[in-house]
Amino acid sequence: MSADHRPAPRRLGDAADRGWREDLARAGAVPAPGPGVLEDARSRLRQAAAAEAPGVHEDVVAERAAAERARSRRRRTAMVAVATAAAVLAAVLAVTAPWAVTTQRPDVVATGQGPVPVEDGGAASCAFAYSPDVLADQVTFAFDGTITRIDTGSLFESNRVTFEVTTWFRGPGADAPASITLPMSPAAPRTGADATTREDSRMLDTPGYTVGTRLLVAGAARFGGGPLEDPVVWGCDFTRYYDRPTAQQWAAALD
Amino acid sequence: MPDSDEDVLARSLRQAAAFEELVRRHSAPVHGYLQRRSSAQVADDLLAETWLQAFASRGSYDPGRGPVRAWLFGVARHVLSAAQRQHRRAHQESSRNEAVTDPAPDWDAVDARLDAAATAPALRSGLASLTGPDRELVLLVVWEQLSPAEAAAVLGIPPGTARSRLHRARRQLRQHVSTPTPAAADPAASHPSSGRPS
């Protein structure tokens, strides 16, 4: 391939932005990678793929997909409900107090600090069935820690959960911090009555948490790179309540 | 109808070779991302590294946080950032002994690209005046054709934050372009010494 890859100006703002937008898009024209570059990437990837030990179970992958579909359905339902409520509210306000329409919005019920699932990244971690071998092979950070603070995220966003770390099993190395704050999912309970399918219930059967909960936490960097860069906490049995035998097992596996 | 990127990635978890389909689909845009922020040679060098890192990290991809395409740009961003750090360390090391001829692959590279494309000085100075994260958002949207939500996924920020930052950046750029300042006539004058995209 040798054709230039010039980004078409994406719509960003109104007509007043068109000039600079097109100017900038023109400056972004670059030649496509040559066939040798692409072949090198493919070749190195094939080597990596061939070297990867099989550690993934198809049924777990299927569960992940099923649970993700269920989660998407719930999100869509929730968003439609919020949008509908907003529309109804706007309509009512338009009739009763037109001046208020632009500033009013429906309240969103905040998530309390009671036990909620460690779901964030759960979909990702369910790509792998838990075992000490997979743990050792896949996670980039793991520790034993106690929750000292939970900053609740807004709807569809993560909580920021702060841990006091007792033991680092893997992660930051020599300069390991004594505490760390990680994004973990907030929001609606997804176990028990709210779990709509068996797969959903099983996949999201992750430990609830609150301040004071002691967990064995495992996860990986979302985009690769450093062990704690854009960290994703893994659910699905990877992150679990602390118990001494498992902590010892982790220490041995992640040494 | 071809499988979605998300389906292909899920399949690659149990059949590693399936991942190559993503390489076929996205190498050109990922290479373009790297090249716009560095050089053709650096992009050639980092493309394979990006794919290897994406392959190794594919278990951490979360469909709830954006499409595969955005996640791949996030991986490329991390790879490029690591290369920049390595370059700077090497530069500091070797500048004690000899001159380094490689251009720094950060905002300097972007600005050089704008210069080479004869981009309006007012636009160059406007971009230079943005904060690193705001500038990166603008470039992800205009150059990589990402939606604000997708750009947010690349940078690991909430979509609402991305939208408000883009709004601010757009207003700022519009002001620069419509009312050029003396500095706009000479972009080097307003060149940020540490304003690299981050």
Image (cartoon, rainbow, N blue to C red):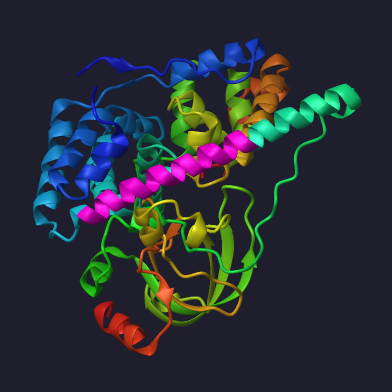
User: For the magenta stretch, what is the residue range?
Assistant: A59-81
Is A33 positioned to the left or the right of A5 in the image?
Answer: left
Residue B149 forms part of the magenta stretch: no
| Most foreground residue, B79 or B112 | B79
Placement of A104 over or under A213, stated as above or below: above
Is A180 positioned to the left or the right of B185 in the image?
Answer: left
Residue A21 lies in quadrant: top right
> Which residue appears at 61% of the width and 75% of the height?
A211
Q: Position of residue B82 (x, y in %)?
A: 37, 52
> Which residue appears at 29% of the width and 31% of the height?
B4
Residue A68 forms part of the magenta stretch: yes
Prevailing SS of the magenta stretch: helix
Asked if one can make out residue A196 in the rendered structure from this viewpoint, the answer is yes
Q: Position of residue A116 (x, y in %)?
A: 55, 64
Is B140 positioned to the left or the right of B80 in the image?
Answer: right
How many numbered marks are there? 0
Residue A209 lies in quadrant: bottom right
> Which residue appears at 26% of the width and 44% of the height?
B10
Residue A249 lies in quadrant: bottom left
Q: Position of residue B49 (x, y in %)?
A: 25, 46
Is B166 positioned to the left or the right of B39 in the image?
Answer: right
| Most foreground residue, A220 or B36 | A220
> Which residue appears at 52% of the width and 59% of the height?
A183
| Most foreground residue, B137 or B162 | B162
- Quadrant (top left/top right/bottom left/bottom right) for the N terminus of chain B: top left
Asked if one can make out residue B96 in the rendered structure from this viewpoint, the answer is no
Q: Position of residue B8 (x, y in %)?
A: 24, 38
